[in-house]
Image: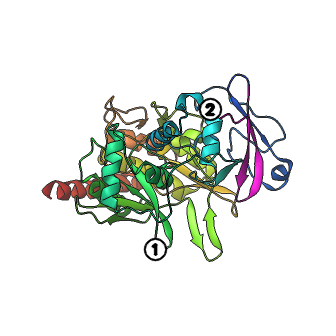
Amino acid sequence: MKTGKLDVFYNEKHVGTLAEMKDKRIAFEYSDTWLNDGFSISPFSLPLEKKVFVPKGYTFGGLFGVFSDSLPDAWGRLLLDRLLKNNDINPDNISELDRLAIIGDSGMGALCYRPSIKLKNEFHEEYDLDLDTISDSCKDILKSKTSDNLDYLYKYGGSSGGARPKVSINYEGDEWLIKFPSHIDDEDIGYMEYEYNECAEKCGIRVAKHRLFDSLKCKGYFGSKRFDRLSTSKGDKRYHMLTASAILEADYRAPCLDYNDLIKLTRILSIDNKKEVENIFRLMCFNVFAHNRDDHAKNFTYIYYEDKDIWLMSPAYDLTYSSTYYGEHTTSVNGNGINPSIEDMIKVAEKNGLNKRKADVIIDEVSHKVKEMLDNYTKI
């Protein structure tokens, strides 16, 4: 298996071509038709110009961040590696370009890659599983055990981002992502994430439509409607989106952002939209008060709206109680990641043109609603 070149498409329009260089970096060039009628798919790294773009380094395995965003993270990568081994392919011998070819049309967001590579498996369309069985199979995979349901898990969850097990299903005509506990999670982590999303919505933060899916083993599995897909009478529409990590070509696996940086980025992309800035500020306050410290650069996403030629923040996601191995917020608050204070939040507001009185109201509102949520949760 060796993919030398790949064509990139957006809603069946040819965007450009990817090609692997001798030093394993992967260059990109826009097509002439896209230069005439398209948009910059990565506003800082890939301006709409006639040239061959080459990544400066290997932060994303030699890819630009925009293309790396199409690849699965920990869970999806684990599934793909297991499936490759089942196909007698050593995962260490395939390139990032090969992985994009395997993803093909199934990645998150709107970009697709051709020609695609199809792996052999035993999956049949009539094969279906209940959510509790899927959850058990996910735990087996994470415990390095084999699973008879590997093909199913890969088909419905192999292209998804994030570290926790998940599958994408059609529910009431829309695509939804359903998460499952890892082998080290509390069995009711889905219920906790549901409560966090409910609280965030009460705090005025945009979140995706969400619900708990029934289980006989726990309080339910957390599910959210995919915001990169929209079902219409004319068919499914796919939205182009980028994580902050991809836009800034920044390694999300290490602390690389401050909320000051994130608000500045939001102001640039949204053309200084005050509502967008306020939404990020509310999210920052929520993450601090709710102890969501795994707020890394891939947990903030921007969606491109072609009709308005503007990037706006996606609904917030991965909202739950979380820590990091170094005990700090991955995105610091005015330089403080250990234990950000209200003073730090106020300084972020001041540095980014938010009215202090408004900032005080938001901080007070969010802190009270989060406290109420946490108090109720501990009583259950």
Is the magenta region chiefly helix, strand or loop? strand
Q: Amino acid at mark 2?
A: Ser
Measuring from the top left, give residue 258's x and y in whole percent.
Answer: 47, 36
Badge 1: few (under 14), some or many (20 or more) residues near its Cα, within 10 Å?
few
Give the residue pinned by disc 1. 172
Nearest the viewer among 302 and 161 is: 161
> Quadrant where the N terminus lies?
top right
Measuring from the top left, give residue 32's x and y in whole percent.
Answer: 86, 48
Nearest the viewer among 289 and 93 is: 93
Displayed quadrant of residue 377: bottom left
Taking the spot 46% from the left edge, 30% from the top edge, the residue there is 254
Badge 2: few (under 14), some or many (20 or more) residues near its Cα, within 10 Å?
some
Task: Report the Cα–Cα distance between label 1 and label 2.
Answer: 37 Å
Measuring from the top left, give residue 299's x and y in whole percent.
Answer: 46, 45
Visible in this render: residue 66? no
Magenta segment boundaries in residue numbering: 1-21
Residue 56 higher or lower than 105, as above or below: above
Nearest the viewer among 49 and 288 is: 49
> Quadrant where the C terminus lies?
bottom left
Q: Residue furthest bottom?
A: 233
Displayed quadrant of residue 239: bottom right
Q: In the image, which disc is placed on residue 95? A: 2
Task: Decide if residue 284 is on the left or right side of residue 234.
Answer: left
Task: Decide if residue 343 is on the left or right side of residue 303.
Answer: left
Tag 2, which secondary structure?
loop
Q: Is residue 257 magenta?
A: no
Task: Decide if residue 137 is on the left or right side of residue 16.
Answer: left
Taking the spot 76% from the left edge, 50% from the top edge, the residue there is 15
Q: Amino acid at mark 1?
A: Glu
Q: Is residue 20 magenta?
A: yes
